[in-house]
């Protein structure tokens, strides 16, 4: 996950319940715990206290002093081991209802202790994320809609997005699907795997395959060299222009 989540009400509770210096280190420990929970996608985890200290950029003794404060504030439950090597941490977060209440002036006037904590774990966040539609979702043509192509297409989308080269990926993917629809599903699947295998940004007909050759260019490969000779020609032209710039004729 690119971000770790902390409720504002939890941070506000730390700020309003502890002294300035203690609040700063307590927030660092709390953020470290939420980061570990986010990485593991689970609110319950077991790690050495030195691991928490490293994530919080604090020494071990400071973390040991702040953990009881976070327990007292109802933000984390700790099942301590006998040898004090690896504790089990259960990260507790405020519910949306409780978070909204903590922002109101009435709640602030009553004091933090009057509002009971309702707990929610990371499974809810994970479920919401799973139900969110993909930002680059496009419709696969029926002629290509096979399990093999679907798997290859997903792998291609993940690979292509990881390059971060396109500003309009949905338009790019729609154009590529339209171009692939002229091939049999098996060939289209292999075209995707060919580009991933070779680290290409675009899609090209299969080499040495008469059945997959086409005179129709891929509209999403504009500006990309299609073979080694074309790449060499462009490189030679660029070098010639550079030499003319640095060595103008008299």
Image (tube, helix red, strand yellow):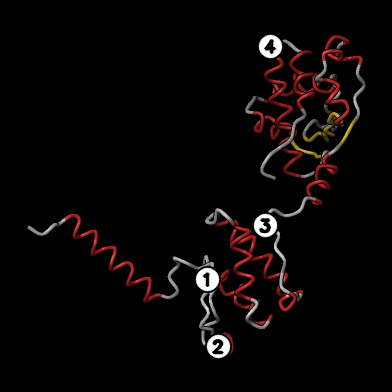
Where residue 51 appears, as percent x and y from the top left, is: 69, 35
Q: Is residue 226 left or right of residue 203?
A: left
Which disc is residue 209 wearing? 2
Q: Quadrant of residue 121?
A: top right
Q: Residues within 10 Å of mark 4 (few under 14, many from 20)?
A: few
Residue at numbered disc 3: 136
Residue at numbered disc 1: 198
Q: Nearer the viewer, residue 129 or 168?
A: 168
Q: Residues within 10 Å of mark 2 (few under 14, many from 20)?
A: few
Q: Which residue reaches farthest bottom? A: 210
**Secondary structure under badge 4?**
helix
Residue at numbered disc 4: 20
**Secondary structure under badge 1?**
helix
The reply to whether callout 2 and callout 3 are in contact (CB within 8 Å) is no
Please give the name of the residue rendered at 76% of the width and 18% of the height, measured from the top-left corner. 14
Q: Earlier in the sequence, mark 2 or mark 3?
A: 3
Q: Earlier in the sequence, mark 1 or mark 2?
A: 1
Whether residue 44 is visible: no
Please give the name of the residue rendered at 76% of the width and 53% of the height, measured from the top-left corner. 133
The reply to whether callout 3 and callout 1 are in contact (CB within 8 Å) is no
């Amino acid at each position: 996950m690119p971000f770790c989540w902390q409720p504002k009400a939890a941070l506000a509770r730390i700020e309003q319940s502890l002294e300035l210096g203690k609040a700063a280190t307590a927030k660092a420990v709390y953020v470290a715990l939420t980061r570990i929970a986010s990485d593991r996608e689970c609110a319950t985890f077991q790690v050495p206290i030195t691991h928490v200290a490293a994530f919080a950029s604090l020494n071990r003794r400071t973390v040991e002093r702040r953990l009881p404060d976070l327990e007292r504030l109802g933000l984390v439950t700790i099942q301590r081991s006998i040898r004090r090597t690896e504790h089990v941490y259960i990260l507790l977060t405020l519910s949306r209802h409780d978070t909204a209440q903590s922002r109101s002036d009435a709640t602030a006037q009553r004091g933090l202790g009057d509002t009971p904590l309702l707990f929610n774990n990371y499974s809810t966040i994970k479920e919401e994320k799973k139900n969110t539609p993909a930002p680059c979702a496009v419709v696969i043509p029926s002629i290509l809609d096979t399990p093999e192509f679907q798997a290859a297409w997903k792998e291609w989308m993940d690979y292509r997005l990881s390059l971060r080269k396109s500003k309009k990926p949905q338009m790019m993917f729609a154009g590529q699907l339209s171009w692939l629809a002229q091939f049999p599903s098996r060939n289209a699947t292999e075209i995707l795997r060919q580009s991933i295998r070779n680290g290409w940004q675009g899609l090209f007909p299969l080499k040495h395959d008469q059945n997959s050759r086409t005179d129709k260019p891929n509209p999403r490969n504009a500006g990309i060299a299609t073979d080694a000779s074309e790449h060499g020609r462009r490189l030679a032209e660029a070098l010639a222009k550079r030499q003319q710039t640095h060595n103008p004729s008299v």
